[in-house]
Image: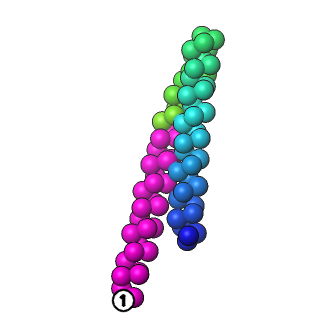
Amino acid sequence: MGTFRRKATEEEVKGVGQKVKGVAQEIAGRATGNREMRAKGEVNQAAGHVRSRAGEAARKIGNAVSREKNRSRR
């Protein structure tokens, strides 16, 4: 796997992890009545979603470029 696709996959995984962290923060904030923690959780969820989608898009672009390179070599 190329470096570009590997990095893209890493970003995708980190984004999912950030979303999970955000969910945990939001739940803890709701349980304790801590509005700041709840808000940070919501922000982390949104940021994680964006990060994982960007990683997914980059991975798909890398795959498409790789397919095109292979197709042109034939």
The N terminus is located in which quarter? Answer: bottom right
Decide if residue 66 is on the left or right side of residue 29.
left
* Principal secondary structure, stretch drawn in magenta: helix
Vertical position of residue 40 compared to residue 13: above or below: above
As drawn, the residue found furthest toward the bottom would be 74
Q: Secondary structure at mark 1?
A: loop
Q: Is residue 28 visible?
A: yes
User: Image height check: is 44 above or below 51?
Assistant: above
The magenta region covers 47-74
Residue 48 vs 63, above or below: the answer is above
The image quadrant of residue 16 is top right
17 or 37: nearer the viewer = 17
| Kind of residue at badge 1 | Arg
Q: Is residue 52 magenta?
A: yes
Q: Quadrant of the C terminus?
A: bottom left
Q: Position of residue 3 (x, y in %)?
A: 58, 69
Colour mapping? rainbow
Q: Could you say which is closer to the camera, residue 43 or residue 61?
A: 61
Seen at 44% across and 74% down, the residue is 66
Residue 65, magenta (yes or no) = yes
- Viewer-closest of 45 and 72: 72
Residue drawn at point x = 44 percent, y = 49 percent = 53
Question: Could you tell me if residue 36 is visible in this image?
Answer: no
Q: Residues within 10 Å of mark 1 (few under 14, many from 20)?
A: few
> Which residue extends farthest front?
74
Looking at the picture, how far across and down is residue 27, in whole percent?
57, 20
Q: Residue at x 42, y 61 (%)?
A: 60
Residue at 60% x, 18% y is: 29
For mark 1, what is the residue?
74
Work out whether 4 lies above or below 43: below
Name the spot of residue 10 as percent of width and height, x first.
Answer: 58, 55
